[in-house]
Image (cartoon, helix red, strand yellow):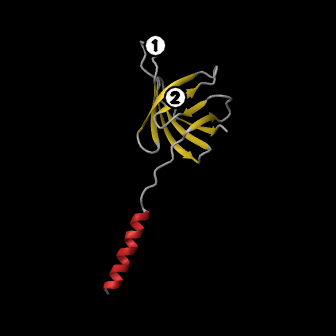
Amino acid sequence: MKLYILLIACMLGGLAGNAQTKKAQKPLGMFIMEGASCAGLKFNSETSATFINEIGCSPWELRIKWIDDKKFFTVEKERTDPKLPPRVMIFEILSYDGKTLKLKEYWTGWGDLKDEVVTYVKEK
């Protein structure tokens, strides 16, 4: 009987050890928006990114703040107009396999635009 209880305890301990949550892989590198020539996000580190606009391929430097393993927001680093607040974008990683990154961008601007799902492909 004691051996039976010991075996069950060992099995449960092994299952609990395997139940640890795996930390989500965070993107790193340049990701081009599907269908665009240069627009995208370059993840410089876990706390820094560059957004590249399709018009003129102009970059804006961003700070990244992680809400959890899947959600983050970006804040524009440099003030472009002293009368305006920094641009803020909120994203959720819907899927990421190391090559393709699918993000849900939550609308944070003026007006009633809808949230958008955008697919990015890692630059080779």
Task: Depth check: give the residue in front, 106 or 56.
Answer: 56
Furthest-front residue in this view: 45
Judged from this view, the residue extending furthest toward the left is 2
Q: Which residue: 53% across, 44% down?
A: 94
Q: Position of residue 9 (x, y in %)?
A: 35, 75
- What whole-number distance in Å separates the C-alpha atoms at marks 2 and 1? 23 Å
Give the amino acid type for the residue marked by disc 1 in the picture: Asp
Q: Amino acid at mark 2?
A: Leu
- Which of the labelled discs sits on residue 113, or is there none? 2
Which residue is at 52% across, 38% downward? 104
Q: Residue 56: percent from the left, percent from the top?
A: 64, 19
Q: Is residue 97 above or below residue 60?
A: below
Front-lying residue, 39 or 78 = 78
Image location (x, y in percent) of residue 16: 39, 65
Q: Residues within 10 Å of mark 1 (few under 14, many from 20)?
A: few
Q: Quadrant of the N terminus?
A: bottom left
Residue 78 in the image: above or below residue 73: above
Residue 76 point in image, percent of width and height = 47, 24
- Judged from the image, the secondary structure of the residue bearing numbered disc 1 is loop
Q: Tags 2 and 1 in contact by the CB under 8 Å rule?
A: no
> Split into 4 quadrants, where in the image is the C terminus?
top right
Q: Is residue 77 above or below residue 11?
A: above
Report which residue position mark 1 lands on. Answer: 81
Marking on residue 22: none
Numbered disc 2: secondary structure: loop
In terms of sequence position, does the residue under pointer 2 or pointer 1 come before the other?
A: 1
